[in-house]
Amino acid sequence: MSHLFLLGTRLLPNEQVRIAPTKIYGIGPKEATRVCSRLGISENIKVNESTKYQIDQIERIIGQNYVVRWELKRVKRADIERLIPISRYRGIRHQDGLPLRGQRTHTNARTCRPFKSIKQRSIRKHLT
């Protein structure tokens, strides 16, 4: 059996047609359901029960109407890069690796704060 692909993403044969497009970066459950209803494809049929024509139709609709995968990542990166040189608050926070939306940083925010080794912290503490 040959594998089916949708915009470069391998589709699992036992997955429902409304779930399969959500594997593509930039397509969520709502968009996937909307695409299926727009084409008149039943959401509950499995990928292996759908025809090649239906898969091609889904791919065509997503390709025409949605920004997905590397294009979406490029757009998001360009938006961040645009904020940094004009010294917007969000751009500065992105640059410093800190939370953007008002979260506290005294405690928590461990995943977004830049890591400093214990040695660097102790040197900074003695200098001040």
Image (tube, grey):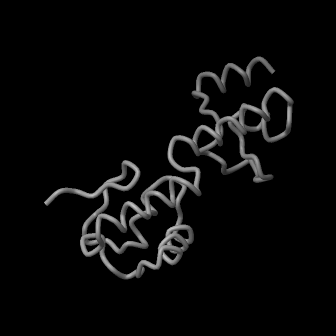
Q: Is residue 96 left or right of residue 37?
A: right
* Residue visible at 48% across and 73% down in the picture: 39
Residue 111, relative to residue 116: is it above or below? below
Q: Position of residue 110 (x, y in %)?
A: 61, 45
* Residue visible at 65% across and 42% down in the picture: 76
- Of all residues, the one furthest to the left in this rendering is 1
Q: Residue 128 falls in which quadrant of the image?
A: top right
* Residue visible at 47% across and 57% down in the picture: 60
* Residue visible at 37% across and 56% down in the picture: 6
Residue 121, relative to residue 52: is it above or below? above
Q: Position of residue 34 (x, y in %)?
A: 55, 73
Q: Position of residue 98 (x, y in %)?
A: 71, 40
Q: Quadrant of the N terminus?
A: bottom left
Q: Is residue 106 left or right of residue 65?
A: right
Residue 53, relative to residue 85: is it above or below? below
Q: Position of residue 3 (x, y in %)?
A: 22, 56
- Return the residue nearer the eye: 105 or 85: 85
Q: Is residue 13 left or right of residue 111?
A: left
